[in-house]
Amino acid sequence: MIRNRAAFFREPGASPGKGPSHGGLLSRSRCYPFVSLGRSSVPRTRMGIHMQRGRKGKRLTVAASVTEVSVDLSAEEVQLPKGDTWSVHKFGGTCVGNSQRIKNVANIIIKDPSERKLVVVSAMSKVTDMMYDLINKAQSRDDSYIFAVDNVLEKHRSTALDLLEGNDLASFLSQLDTDINNLKAMLRAIYIAGHATESFTDFVVGHGELWSAQLLSFVIKKSGVDCKWMDTRDVLIVNPTNSNQVDPDFAESENRLEKWYSQNPNNTVIATGFIASTPYNIPTTLKRDGSDFSAAIMGALLRARQVTIWTDVDGVYSADPRKVGEAVILKTLSYQEAWEMSYFGANVLHPRTIIPVRNYGIPIIIRNIFNLSAPGTMICQPADDELEDGLKLESFVKGFATIDNLALVNVEGTGMAGVPGTASAIFGAAKDVGANVIMISQASSEHSVCFAVPEKEVQAVEEALKKTFRQALDAGRLSQVQVIPNCSILAAVGQKMASTPGVSATLFDALAKASINVRAIAQGCSEYNITVVVKREDCIKALRAVHSRFYLSRTTIAMGIIGPGLIGSTLLEQLREQAAVLKEEFNIDLRVMGITGSRSMLLSEMGIDLSQWRKLLKDSGEAADLGKFVQHVHGNGFIPNTVLVDCTADSAVASHYYSWLCKGIHVITPNKKANSGPLDQYLKLRALQRQSYTHYFYEATVGAGLPIVSTLRGLLETGDKILRIEGIFSGTLSYIFNNFTGSRIFSEVVGEAKEQGYTEPDPRDDLSGTDVARKVIILARECGLKLELSDINVDSLVPKPLQTSGLTDEFMRQLPKFDQDMANKRKEAEAAGKVLRYVGVVDVTNRTGVVELRNYDNDHPFAQLSGSDNIIAFTTVRYSKQPLIVRGPGAGAEVTAGGIFSDILRLASYLGAPS
Ligand code: ADP
Ligand code: ASP
Ligand code: MG
């Protein structure tokens, strides 16, 4: 029924641009159509048109200047249906940022199945800024405002050319031209005067919304859906306040909305955001970002079912996503929480948006226009039982927000205590200079009052205070009025957080751990908010520290990888492959914050993209600096745990472990240098490890990924007594002796192992036995033997004359000369039914260690090996008859990296990850 009427009331040929309300400076009377429109007056354009009877239709005869006609006043009596049939949408600037996006918005509106829709639109993105810029340029007499106006014109003209055609296009462009000409005239006046009044400014800056609303309504009509566009200056009436805000006059706005609707009844209304009128019909605005507020007011006036605010993020995040990469979307927020979040800087929502809808319990949903699959954030009154929902910290702390560019003012003195009126005098002074006091904190001793104001207002506040308290300052009753510049506010918001024991303690603990100095604290009695003031340069760090404390899994670990060689890069690859599974299934979040080689290093604030670390290191790496590297990885301030993974074989890197552990940095390594280095340093390291909760894991130093150190530890910790550890610890030597059979000669097998990449570049590094000796010493020390590397008897397989002889090639050429010696040993062994094996032995009973070539029976497990396998036999009191044997591949990048990786996961589980 209404739809029919809507068609009927549409004025033939009328375009929105020619509608009754919209015009520029030079068409003032058209701009304020309701000035003369009382209940009995009728717009002139309707005169003479026969109107259908309204529901409560009555006829009235009015005298018009042209002729006396009978006019049906039912137009005013098409009642505005209020309630659930309406849904309100608001599209932010980015949603209507270009022609494609405007089409997209039109589609969303058309597809919304609601019976009635009111759509509030912002100006196209950046346009409001451009409009303010015009004013600034004009009033500072900068001629370039003329080009700037042309840019505004061009932006809208080209968008219209993309979207519209025919009459629609002509009508829009003609209105645009008229508006721009009016604006030019107005800006010229401002230019001459060198000043723009607030109402001039508001009139100019509101044009972005006028144009975007008209464009959108044309596009919707073009798709065959009838709609009306509304210049909200005709409907929204607001009273300016002296705090750069406006208070809606709901009663008057509702009246005007009813009237507007009675003349434009339609199920789809496209309304301008941001703009409104004063009770005297002077155009004004709801101030920056005010379109959200416009939508909420409209929602309240219509008693709508819901208000959907469409923007460019998936909803309200637990912190500004531009500042905190791991911020999470909040599914729901109470009205109060949303208000506190937005008031304290979460600009996803204008703070005043909440007030109108809360009165009617209308929910607000924040949704992402670019990701329709995201459900968004629902802001509503939580059900009573939700407030008690679990006892998790997250349910008390919803989110964090910050406000920058503040200064603290501290008024201090003994003469303040117990003197009534001091606070009022202080804040009166601030009010007199128009300063916005954002937070206040007063110690109960009443010796000081401290408050935060925007930095740009602080000078005036300081002067006003000094003036007001001149006498008190001179008399010494007040000791000082102190300004602390460069501050930021960090607010933690959450239902009941402040009254829940432990929540604020956790917050301050997180700040303390990140070394953030808190300058002032305020906790509202509302218990929804705890506000702290910090130095501006600390603000992001503080935000990340508290956010991670409440939102990150406890097992988020910042990692620094030292030495991206073969093993390091294999580890990075394994981390890349497993990262998602670990995060999703095991709640372990491993972030590689830095990778350093010996020449260059790559640092990242949020975690390196492991699929392209090589390229990043090459393109954006900086000169390697281990000190800086460690500081970066550990000093991020928002990830609770740090581990440095040393994948080098460098004793210089190993020499830092002690100081890293002292700083609370965990260390994981396959590097044998620390544990096989000087005994006193080793003992110091282990003592430190036992005292602190900082972990040092080195499983991959022996047998690569095989569980050797952990098996040994398990035996020792459960009270077994180790008698002997004997094993083939070198994959290279395992390969060589496993293949040194039949008719083969020793030098040939060594050459083959070298070719296959089983040996170090110089095979003497393997044949010398030093590497095996290092492993022996690591295990010996683990068993409590206080041995130095030099205490191990090592039977080197490098013939004496070749030990120092020249280059690798020379060594390989000379080696065949000594084949006979080795062949003899083999023959001897074979004759006795045995095989040769190069082993390391820890004789715990005799407190010695040895590395040598030994003979083993053909049926001994050591004789059964193949390839480059390691095998280690633990003979203990419990395993005395049959040793406990660990066997498997004990060399190679994959398995070594796997060993390191499993240490990392062990660390994660020590730190609280689920097992
Ligand atoms: P619109 O033009 O749609 O009104 P705004 O720029 O006003 O968009 O608000 C959306 C922006 O708010 C997001 O792009 C985001 O960067 C920022 N923002 C700040 N804090 C938050 C938060 N806690 N949750 C979501 N977005 C936030
Ligand atoms: N266009 C206005 C602004 O940018 C209002 C809004 O988009 O919310 O401030
Ligand atoms: Mg906004």
Image (cartoon, grey):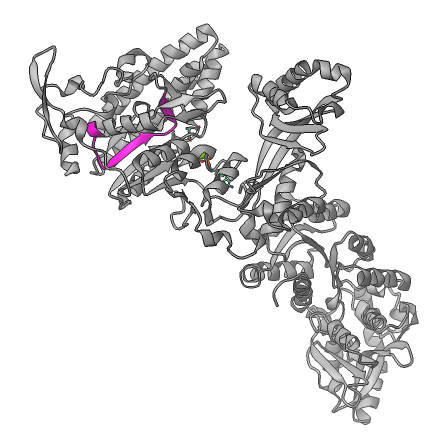
Residue 512 visible in the displayed image: yes
Report the front residue among 346 and 768.
346
Position above or below: 140 against 821 = above
Q: Residue at the spot x=49%, y=51% of the render?
A: 387
> Which quarter of the rendered picture does the N terminus lie within?
top left
Instruction: Determine the image quadrant of residue 403.
Output: top right
Instruction: Give x and y (percent) for residue 453.
Output: 60, 26
Instruction: Determine the image quadrant of residue 444.
Output: top right
Instruction: Give x and y (percent) for residue 3.
Output: 16, 37
Residue 674 visible in the displayed image: no
Left or right: residue 712 compared with residue 91: right
Left or right: residue 365 compared with residue 37: right
Instruction: Determine the image quadrant of residue 5.
Output: top left
Instruction: Give x and y (percent) for residue 624.
Output: 73, 46
Q: Which residue lies furthest to the top in this view?
A: 192
Report the front residue among 87 and 113.
87
Residue 143 sits inside the magenta stretch: no
Q: In which quarter of the image is ligand 2?
A: top left
Residue 267 sits inside the magenta stretch: yes
Q: Residue at the spot x=70%, y=30% of the render?
A: 446
Q: What span is in magenta?
A: 262-277
Position above or below: 779 against 671 = below
> Which quarter of the rendered picture does the C terminus lie within?
bottom right
